Image (cartoon, rainbow, N blue to C red):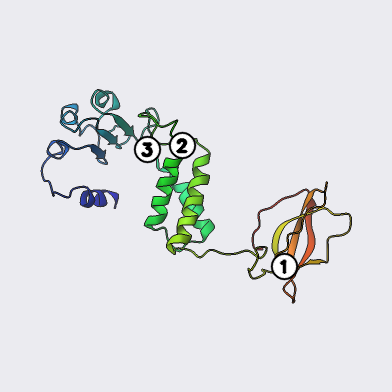
């Protein structure tokens, strides 16, 4: 699919012929083919400061050593060269975001959000010809991609944003687990108005509680788990 999309959307003049014919005067080469199909002689005919994405693995269309004298930016799929383009930068966060949003599909806005999130992981101070994408070991990538994809799923209609029972104006969800606190008196059976936070007493440790909707729309708190434990708010 990617190769077909590139062929349709990057050739508005419907050029025909060899790679050398298409490369002449071009600014960007994206290789998704095989080893050693792009030569330094062809690269020299491209526009000034060209960009080369030689993605064939393990042997790229042109080796970075051969392209370096003529290209401004070079990227490959290999980990032993700068600018490794690896799908591991995308798919864990994309799936995490789609699952968190309970998206019905992974659409183009979600993919574009993932790409922008990956790019944003490289700061302006870090950005240079040999560092245009973050490292596959950068721990912030998955988190930021997942968040961006989740928000894009909501914005594009691929998922509906769900409000939890402890959010004001939301419908209470029986059995919802959240975080409460140790208190001097037993917590079980305590009732608070729905939407009102259960503020921790000074000096008390958090503890896991269960919020249950009452018939009057309030929330009944009951203790579960051990003092000091924390969990994410989630339906049970």
Residue 160 is situated, as x and y percent measured from the top left of the image, at: 50, 65
Residue 168 is situated, as x and y percent measured from the top left of the image, at: 65, 65
Residue occupying the point 64% across, 59% down: 234
Mark 3 surroundings: few (<14), some (14-19) or many (≥20) residues within 10 A: many
Name the secondary structure under disc 3.
loop
Question: CA–CA distance between discs 2 and 3?
Answer: 9 Å
Near-viewer residue (62 or 181): 181
Q: Does label 2 or label 1 sit earlier along the sequence?
A: 2
Near-viewer residue (193 or 131): 193
The numbered dot on residue 136 is 2
Residue 66 is situated, as x and y percent measured from the top left of the image, at: 25, 24
193 w.r.t. 79: above or below: below
Q: In which quarter of the view is residue 186 placed?
A: bottom right
The numbered dot on residue 85 is 3
Locate residue 187 relative to residue 18 in the image: left or right.
right
Mark 2 surroundings: few (<14), some (14-19) or many (≥20) residues within 10 A: some
Residue occupying the point 44% across, 41% down: 120
Mark 1 surroundings: few (<14), some (14-19) or many (≥20) residues within 10 A: many
Residue occupying the point 46% across, 53% down: 149
Q: Which residue is mark 1?
A: 194
């Amino acid at each position: 699919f990617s190769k077909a999309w590139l062929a349709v959307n990057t050739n508005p003049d419907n050029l025909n012929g060899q790679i050398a014919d298409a490369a002449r005067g071009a600014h960007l080469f994206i290789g998704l083919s095989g080893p050693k199909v792009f030569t330094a002689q062809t690269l020299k005919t491209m526009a000034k400061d060209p960009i080369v994405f030689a993605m064939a693995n393990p042997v790229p269309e042109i080796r970075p050593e051969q392209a370096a004298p003529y290209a401004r930016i070079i990227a490959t799929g290999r980990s032993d060269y700068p600018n490794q383009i690896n799908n591991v930068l995308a798919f864990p966060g994309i799936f995490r975001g789609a699952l968190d949003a309970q998206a019905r599909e992974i659409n183009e806005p979600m993919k574009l959000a993932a790409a922008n999130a990956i790019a944003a992981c490289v700061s302006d101070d870090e950005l240079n010809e040999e560092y245009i994408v973050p490292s596959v070991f950068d721990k912030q990538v998955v988190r930021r991609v997942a968040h961006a994809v989740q928000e894009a799923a909501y914005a594009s209609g691929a998922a509906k944003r769900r409000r939890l029972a402890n959010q004001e104006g939301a419908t209470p969800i029986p059995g919802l687990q959240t975080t409460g606190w140790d208190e001097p008196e037993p917590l079980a059976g305590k009732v608070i108005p729905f939407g009102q936070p259960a503020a921790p007493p000074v000096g008390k440790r958090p503890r896991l509680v269960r919020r249950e909707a009452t018939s009057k729309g309030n929330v009944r708190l009951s203790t579960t788990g051990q003092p000091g434990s924390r969990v994410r708010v989630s339906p049970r």
